[in-house]
Image (spheres, rainbow, N blue to C red):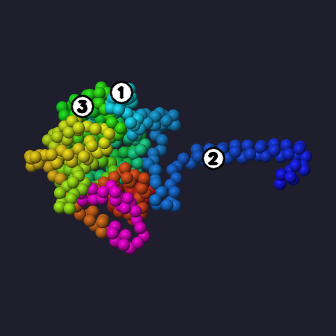
Amino acid sequence: MFDYYRKNRTRKIHLFSVLSFALIIFIVTFSDNLISNFSSSHSIAFVSKSSSQQPLKSTFIQKPIFSKKKETHIIKEEELDDHVNLVPPFNLTVEQRISWFKKNLPKFRILKSSTLSRQFNNRVNNFLNSRNCRVKFFMTWISPANTFSKREFFALETLFKSHPKGCLIILSRTLDTPRGSKILNPLIESGYNVISVTPELSFLFNRTPAETWYAELKRGNKDPGEIPLAQNLSNLIRLAVLYKYGGVYIDTDFIILKDFSNLRNSIGAQSVSTNGNWTRLNNAVLIFDRKHPLLYKFMEEFALSFDGNKWGQNGPYLVSRVVERLTEKNKYNFTVLPPISFYPVDWVRVPGFFMKLNTRTHSRWIDAKLLQLSGKTYGVHLWNKQSSNMRIEKGSIIGRLISDHCLFCKDIYDS
């Protein structure tokens, strides 16, 4: 081939090279324009249907509320509340982490008071007093609003399917925004009682065992640890809000199956031993009266033993430690509910609840499991950390539970 070109005149070689280069430039330019035009006119999320095991990254997709310029501003504001990424570098000493924390304190917006947060108590009381709430629910959301996905929205749907006269208050700075209002509007317009409220942490922790600890934290005198601080604060916020108002705290990664109104002063066991005694409690669901002494003990333990380096230390392990140490359990008037109540599947096995195999044996197992859950299960914890990227397969346990307990039931198998 090269011998052939050598036999041709140099002029033809130059002409061919110029024409080839021009053609390549034309193709690249044309392709870029075509792709750009297609992208701008078809801004939708694509999900492959070829494999049910492929991780799904869809969220509760919202059309822009404002113009593009204003929407960009909102995203930047939410990024400031992305506490998952606001962590100190690894392998620092305690002194180095505290120094890092003091330097970065202005970035921790969750610790700051604002005009909106200072209205927290009035807004909560006005909301509750203006409604006849059969059950009071509280949730927290510390992540950006644009990460509140369909999966979380199904939790709200199932909550109100089981509690049409219930009230839900979501403690969240990022959902207490126009974007957050748009997410909740389908429920609000359908007459359900739900509101997002920016929390005022100084008020919530005032006159609790956590008050002094929080004051030192705000001064930058505490080691935040390597786990995102907001995640640990969420463990304390749920205790404080129940201590102030009473009711039910529940995580956003639940499917709620049954009315909670007959439950009082209860916490769920995550696991039990062979003789039926609990081995681990969990704080993903807490049901307590206002100023319950066990909540006080939980907050006291949080302030005394806070460790931001150990996952679960300030959450599930904390409530387990406190209850295990109680010498006069009857004095505290509370019930430990069995795992079937809220944790019928553990985090290791939860992927099986999202799958549907095309075998008779698996179909029978699903039917038997659903029958079991219809009995004594109030809600199913989805262990979002393990399951958030799993697609809900049609006919799976999770798919059928959501189908039976949702309100709007949109795009179940695209979540």
Q: Nearer the viewer, mark 2 or mark 3?
A: 3
Q: What residue is pinned by disc 2? A: 35
Reading the chain from its start, which is encountered first: label 2 or label 3?
2
- Tag 1: Cα neighbours inside 10 Å, few (<14), some, or many (≥20)? some
Q: Which SS class for mark 3?
A: helix
User: For residue 342: magenta?
Assistant: yes
| Separation (CA) of disc 2 from disc 3 | 55 Å
Callout 3 amino acid: Trp
Q: Is residue 277 above or below residue 102?
A: below
**Quadrant (top left/top right/bottom left/bottom right) for the C terminus:** bottom left
Reading the chain from its start, which is encountered first: label 1 or label 3?
1
Residue 67: percent from the left, percent from the top? 50, 36
Q: Which SS class for mark 2?
A: helix
Residue 235: percent from the left, percent from the top? 27, 41
Residue 276: percent from the left, percent from the top? 18, 60
Chain part drawn in magenta: 339-367
Q: Is residue 92 above or below residue 372?
A: above
Reading the chain from its start, which is encountered first: label 2 or label 1?
2
Q: Which SS class for mark 1?
A: helix
Quadrant position of residue 81: top left
The residue shown at (41%, 72%) is 359
Left or right of 28 in this view: 164: left
Q: Nearer the viewer, residue 263 or 299?
A: 299
Callout 1 amino acid: Ser
Q: What residue is pinned by disc 3? A: 213
Q: What residue is pinned by disc 1? A: 99
The residue shown at (86%, 52%) is 3
